[in-house]
Image: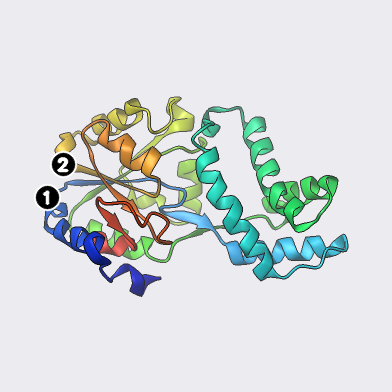
Amino acid sequence: MRDEGRRGEGVIGDLRYAIRDMRHDYSTYLFDVGGTLITFDEERRAEAYAKRAGQVGVRVSAQEVLQVFEKHNRALLERMKQVQLSLLPASEQRAFWVDFWGDSFRELGVQNEDAQRFAAELLDGVNGGDFQQVYADVVPALDALQARGKRLGIISNFSPNCEALLKRLGLAHYFDFFIVSGIIGMEKPDPRIFQAAIQASGKAVLELVYIGDSVFHDVEGARGVGMDAILIDRAHRFPEFKNARVRDLRELS
């Protein structure tokens, strides 16, 4: 994946490298969290699904589970446009994720009651459900940006525990400020959340650039307030996207 991120891809590759000099003018780099800095360890989660499915007589391989994950994760991108999840009460947020994780069990052939029970277990760290991990390119990219004297910030549609989670994952110390939807009461692409970040940075908007994995929430949201944006597209999910895009965060430096 990292090698792919360093190769140009036709027009998009040319554009990506053409804007490299422009990036050196930014004083502040702002980042999304989920899907940009952190993700789920899907291979380990798939193994946990396969193990639990086997407990109720459903025999599937981890590879088969991964294929179901891919399908449901793609659908989640559209689903998240319709719900402001981080603004819901904690109990409703958990119910959303239990239902979403349960969908994969149900597609694998697990009955609904067991699917819901297994999903709830895997969302509970006490039961081995701590699947969050940092993408491999993140720490090298943040180190390089800090070495160049860049300020770093967060704008994220996330529950109020965002900073605490990033601290546990060893990332929080990189960031000068955190603009988190679950705290300030608005989600991307609402322009007010980006305006809050501009204010927190103390810089002109032309000095800022936002990096995220969603065209709708991140790229379009940032541009709505005149902020430059770069799409992080590690899995090449947006081949038709014609603006600034990277496949590896180390390309930022």
**Helix, strand or loop at mark 2:** helix
Residue 4 x/y as whole percent: 35, 71
Which residue is found at the position 16% from the left and 53% from the top? 23
Q: What kind of colouring is applied to the model shown?
A: rainbow
Residue 172, relative to residue 128: is it above or below? above
Hey, which quadrant is residue 189 in on the image? top left
Marks 1 and 2: in contact by CB < 8 Å?
A: yes
Q: Pick out the residue farthest to the bottom.
A: 3
Q: Would residue 250 be found to the left or right of residue 204 on screen? A: right
Percent x, y for residue 81? 49, 35
Can residue 19 be seen at all in this image of the molecule? yes
- The disc, 2 or 1, on the residue closer to the chain's N-terminal end is 1
Pinpoint residue 204: horizontal percent, then vertical percent: 15, 34
The quadrant the N terminus occupies is bottom left
Marking on residue 207: 2
User: At label 1, which amino acid type do we have?
Assistant: Asp
Residue at horizontal 38 percent and vertical 45 percent from the top: 32
State the CA–CA distance, disc 2 to disc 1.
7 Å
Which residue is disc 1 drawn over?
A: 25
Which residue type carries mark 2? Glu
Query: Where the C terminus falls, by quadrant?
Result: bottom left
